[in-house]
Amino acid sequence: MLDSLVESLVLTFSWPVFFFLLLGLLIGIFIGMIPGIGPAIGLTLALPFTVVIDEISAMVLLTGMYVGGVYGGSVSAILLNVPGTAASAASTFDGYPLSRQGRARDALAISAAASAIGGLFAIILVFLSTPIITELVLAFGTPEFVLIAFFGLAMITVVARGSLVKGITAGMIGMLLATIGLSPGATEVRYDFGSLALYDGLDLVTVILGLFAIAEMIRLSGETGGIAKNSEITGSVLGGLSEIRRHARSLPKFSLVGVLIGAIPGAGSSVANFVAYGEAVRSDSSDDTYGKGNPRGLIASEASNNSSVAGSLVPTLSFGIPGSIISAILLGALLMHGIQPGPSLFSSNLHITFSIYWVVVIGSVLVIPVIGLFVVTRIGAITKINTKYLIPGIVVLCMFGAYAIRSNWADLIVVLAVGILGILLVRYNYSIIALLLGMILGPIAENNLDRAMQLSDGSYWIFFDSTISKLMWVGIAIFVLTPVIKKYRNRT
Amino acid sequence: MSLIDTISNNAYVEALDDERTIAVLFLVLSAYTFLESYSFVEQAARWPRYISVIAIVGCLLVLAKNVLPEPLRLFVDDESSKLVDRELEAELEEEQPADDAFDLAASVFTLAGTFVFVVLTLTAGYLVATVVFVAAFSWYFDIDYKIAAGYLVALLLVMYLLGQGLNIPLTEGLY
């Protein structure tokens, strides 16, 4: 095993593999920053070109794009409130307020360092505990998937600061939006108004673009000056790094959340960053600055979304189960090069598996810190540019990106409509996070609930059978009851 | 006084400036999804029906906030978050220059401009829509025409390159 590890390291640093690694990471960071494009579309576009290169270079290029894309999505999320990917949506909650306070450099440094440390911690964890994680992933059946969704939804009670009822209502509206289109089991097309354009429902990234980017651009156009409201950008790379040092003890926890949720097929980084953010808020409930520029909130999101990349590799490589669209593309690339995912990747083809792991390590240790701390932090100055020069470009690119996702004209209307909804939600203190959680977790809950009820012939005891289920119920109870009890205590 | 100012100062618009407006909107939406679910087969109807009921209850609680008993009202009102927001807003106001007031008319213009952009993209394509949107935006926000022209060319170049890769037509309507 150690031989394979060294052999794959040498291989990764050899020509032209290392070139493809750097290329993948740089392209990934770039496409991650473009609203709506993101790593999924980038990998899809790159996949046919990998036919002409060897299998190691192909996997290294695609994995590099994946790692870079997840990180790049956070840059636009922090600077412009435009998450490049769903995995970066939670980074807007505290990253963008930091930019507004003139601390963009702090925020970008936090993002780079948390992504790097999180990614590194995650890959070490995956490397050391792949057998345990695979056991754990296999232990998750349909009922446990339902409980994961419920667990995420229970977080609404934590993240919906202010009115609990308004938070839950927003979550339900998010879930209702997610019911548009073909139902699970393909039995019915719901709320489509007879239009084929709504057959596949609403796309998550499209909704995120509207909710964050368009809503924010419309609001920003009513202000003068740049995004940063302070006259000087006060943040610095060192300032950001000192925040990382201050919250160093929380980093492994957020990374672990990323790995575990990333490893669960169907959950992935779009869920991981919300769960980690929710945990950050829950475990630090004395602090009311979450959502207003709390560095720990940003660390939670950034550490978890990069860790989820490593986590998602586990089911993909171990069983050939793609947990997300990106994992499916990676799987496609493996198959395209004649490599069968599964046990062979941990025996005769171990060097390929390790090369993929090395991409995450090198990306986390060398590329993201170097580019993130020394190049990207300089982009922080963008927050001083008068927004009237930024708004038209961002609006046009968001609308372009929204159409690029699946070539559906209705997505443009969705972006605009959801943008207006986003303005109203912020204006009247309804939680945007809750709405998004509902939108992400609703389909997971419905799909698996339906299946679980069929498996159990309608008996709800299926949700209490396994030890994991019982533990998850305890977790859900803690999440739901803690804020309720706290609210009563505060009043009395 | 401009048309937009007249609209924004209108008494009806002021009356709408209430959290209950969005609760009514959500109530209508969830009532529709609830009723519509009866046109689906049972398997597809169950989930949206449950969710709609919870959403309806939530909306009704928000609408009836003022008449709710104290223990229940505790979970509906958001006084604590408003208190924090006001403190933060006050801090931000101190940091901002005095002339940094919010211009509602400009936001309404951007919203209307985005709407026109979407309509034009669907009917005439990205090329026409982008030219019109950037030109109108630059005119309204007083951006120097040379900068606007350069900006437009750069934007179209990016769109052209991405469009080539992603096979997105720029010169024809998407609808």
Image (cartoon, helix red, strand yellow):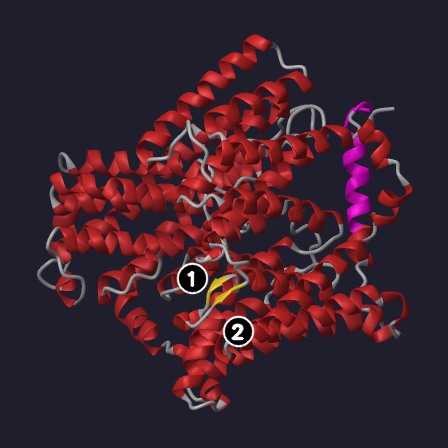
The quarter of the image holding the N terminus of chain A is bottom left
The crowd level at tag 1 (other Cα within 10 Å; few <14, some 14-19, many 20+) is many
Q: Position of residue B124 (x, y in %)?
A: 49, 29
Q: Residue A451 vs residue A344: left or right?
A: right
Residue A36 is at least partly visible in this image? no
Q: Position of residue A107 (x, y in %)?
A: 55, 38
In 3D space, how far apart are the residues under numbered discs 1 and 2 (Cα atoms)?
41 Å
Q: Residue A126 vs residue A401: left or right?
A: left
Question: Relative to the observer, which residue lies in front, A40 or A268?
Answer: A40
Q: Residue A94 vs residue A203: left or right?
A: right
Q: Quadrant of residue B160?
A: top left
Q: Quadrant of residue B11?
A: top right
Element type where label 1 sits in the image: helix
Which residue shows up at 18% across the image and 62% down it?
A341
Question: Relative to the observer, which residue lies in front, A330 or A298?
Answer: A330
Q: Main secondary structure of the magenta part?
A: helix
Which residue shows up at 78% across the image and 50% down it?
B84
| B98 part of magenta stretch | yes
Query: Which residue reaches farthest left?
Result: A348
Quickly name the residue at label 2: B40
Q: Quadrant of residue A450?
A: bottom left
User: Magenta region: which residues?
Assistant: B84-99
Residue A134, above or below A286? below
Residue B164, above or below B84? above
| A469 part of magenta stretch | no
Q: Position of residue A109 (x, y in %)?
A: 49, 37
Quickly name the residue at label 1: A256
Label 1–label 2 contact, CB within 8 A: no
The chain identifier of the residue carrying mark 1 reads A
